[in-house]
Image (cartoon, rainbow, N blue to C red):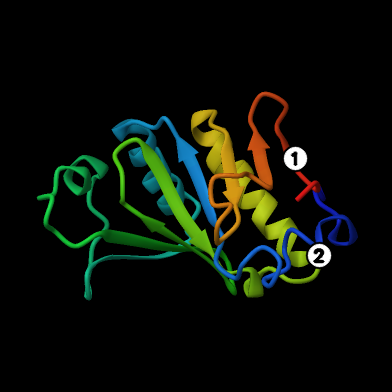
Amino acid sequence: MTDLLWGDVVDVFDPVATGRLPDVRVPGVSVADRQALSGLVVARGWWREYAEGCRVLPLPAAARVLSRRCDAEVPTLCAEPVPGFRAIFRFLSDETIDFGIDLYELQGQEGPDAFSGFLRAIGRRRDRTLFLCPAGPDVDRAILWYEPGGDRIAVRHDR
C-alpha cells in the first residue's frame, strides 16, 4: 500500500529543503515502549547494531540502557528495515524516542514506501504518533507524521 506518492512528497524528502538528516520523534514514551521498539527490531529481523561510543555490544534490555550513568556515552541503535535505509536511534531522553534518517537513502517512490512502512510498524507497535521534523531552525515543527488512530501518514506542505 502506498501512503505517499513521490510526486506529492518530493519536497518533504528533499535533502536540501528539509535538511539531509531530519529527526523523527516519539514523545511521551516509557521503558516498556522502548523495550517494544527493541523487540520490534529483533522480531522483524532487521539488521541492527547497538553501540555505546565506539563499542559495538549485544542489544541490552531498555531498562539497562536507560539506567546508565549520566556521564556515560550516548548509546545508539542502528536499524535497517530495508537494505539501503537506516534509522539511527539515540537514547538521549527517557521520555522521547529519537532517531535520525538520511534523506539521500529515501529517494524515488521506494523511499516514501520504505519510510511509511517503518513509521507504521513503530507506531502500531505501541499505538504512538511519530513526528518527522526537519533539520535546522524548525526542528520542533513536524512536516510529516504517523497517526495511529487513523493508521495514516499525514504531511504538512505549508512550510
Q: Is residue 24 above or below residue 107?
A: above
Count of numbered circles on the image: 2
Q: Is residue 75 above or below residue 3?
A: below
Image coordinates of residue 22 in percent, x first then y, are 56, 60
Task: Quadrant for residue 113, please give it.
Answer: bottom right
Q: Is residue 100 above or below residue 141?
A: below
Mark identifier at residue 71? none
Task: Quadrant for residue 84, please give it.
Answer: bottom right
Identify the residue at image location x=63%, y=44%.
142
Image coordinates of residue 31 in percent, x first then y, are 29, 34
Q: Is residue 65 above or below residue 77?
A: above
Helix, strand or loop for disc 1: strand
Q: Nearer the viewer, residue 145 or 139?
A: 139
Mark identifier at residue 109? 2
Q: Nearer the viewer, mark 2 or mark 1?
A: 1
Q: Earlier in the sequence, mark 2 or mark 1?
A: 2
Task: Work out how far the residue at label 2 is from the one at label 1, CA to CA, in angstroms.
Answer: 16 Å
Mark 1 closeness class: few <14, some 14–19, many ≥20 residues within 10 Å: some
Helix, strand or loop for disc 2: loop
Q: Is residue 40 left or right of residue 50?
A: right
Image coordinates of residue 13 in percent, x first then y, are 72, 63
Mark 2 closeness class: few <14, some 14–19, many ≥20 residues within 10 Å: some
Q: Which residue is mark 1?
A: 154
Image coordinates of residue 9 in percent, x first then y, are 81, 57
Q: Nearer the viewer, residue 130 or 33?
A: 130
Q: Amino acid at mark 2?
A: Gln
- Furthest-front residue in this view: 137
- Furthest-top residue in this view: 149
Q: Amino acid at mark 1?
A: Ala
